[in-house]
Amino acid sequence: MKNNLKAIAVGIAVALLVGCGADAPSMAPDAARNSGNLVMIPNNQNAQNPAQASAQDPRQILSGISTQYQRIQSLSSNMTTFCTANGKSSSCAVNAYFRKPGSLSVVITSNTDAKAVGTKVVYQGGTQCNVKTKFFGFAVKLNLAVTDSRLGSLRGDTLLDTGIVRMMEILLDPNAKHRILGNALLDGKPVTILEVISSRALKGITREIYYIDNQSKIPCVREMYEGNRMVFKCQFKNVVLNPQVPSSAFILD
């Protein structure tokens, strides 16, 4: 049971991509070369495009992110995560629902450990998570503390550490250092690449890099670094803002 639940770890480390875990260059455009269909936009093109040029001021893009996040009451997304620590790495894909103030529901659709596929984790505040998984082919339901190591990432981060609420606190930290690293097209969508150095970051993380969708004003990729080494990456796809959340999303059927 314990080994099976341990495989849940990366799947519930939200915040949704596959990276290499090797030492990466310090600039995001190079570090993100595995981020799907990424095409960098040269700076001289930004200068010819007033809309892109104005986005070079971090305060403007942060204001847009903050305004959009205030409007969001719920969202759904397909998320893919990668984590590496102590010479090991894992990747996972989940279907996720988030609902303010901090409820989360994920169903694992792919995992480094195939036994975790189909596991559902529901968190609705407090100190406990509800989990439904399989053990020798039989459905098993149980409650686990949010801090339970079996629900932690390879780095030891908890569900709340890597969740959307904490992510936005770090991204919008007014005392953080924000820097625009460039603009790009990710899967054909214009994004702004933003570096964030915050005292609110998780233990050992020296900086984070976000790819902000210029239209929706929300992150579509999040990367965490220990120095120049990327140790966690998450990509959000098929994001729907304020969806009609099915009643089954936050219960273990």
Image (cartoon, rainbow, N blue to C red):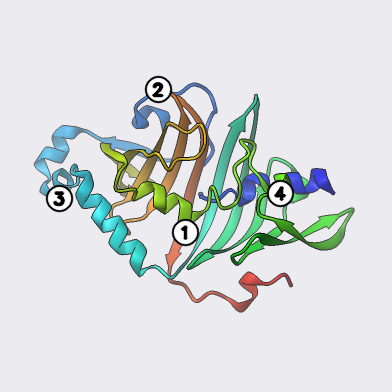
Is the C terminus in the top left, top right, bottom left or bottom right quadrant? Answer: bottom right
Mark 1 Cα-neighbour bin, 10 Å: few <14, some 14–19, many ≥20 = few
Check disc 4 and report the residue beneath it.
148
Check disc 3 and report the residue beneath it.
51
Tag 4: residue type? Answer: Asp
Q: Are marks 1 and 4 in contact (CB under 8 Å)?
A: no
Q: Residue at x 73, y 46 (%)?
A: 150
Q: Secondary structure at mark 2?
A: loop
Check disc 1 and report the residue beneath it.
238
Check disc 2 and report the residue beneath it.
25
> Marks 1/2: CA distance?
29 Å
Tag 2: residue type? Answer: Pro
- Look at the picture and state if 165 lies above or below 224: below
- Look at the picture and state if 226 lies above or below 111: above
Res 209 quadrant in image: top left
* Residue 151 image position (x, y, % from top left): 69, 48
Q: Earlier in the sequence, mark 3 or mark 1?
A: 3
Tag 3: residue type? Answer: Ala
Q: Residue at x 46, y 72 (%)?
A: 243
* Residue 122 image position (x, y, % from top left): 65, 63
Pair 1/4: label in front? 4
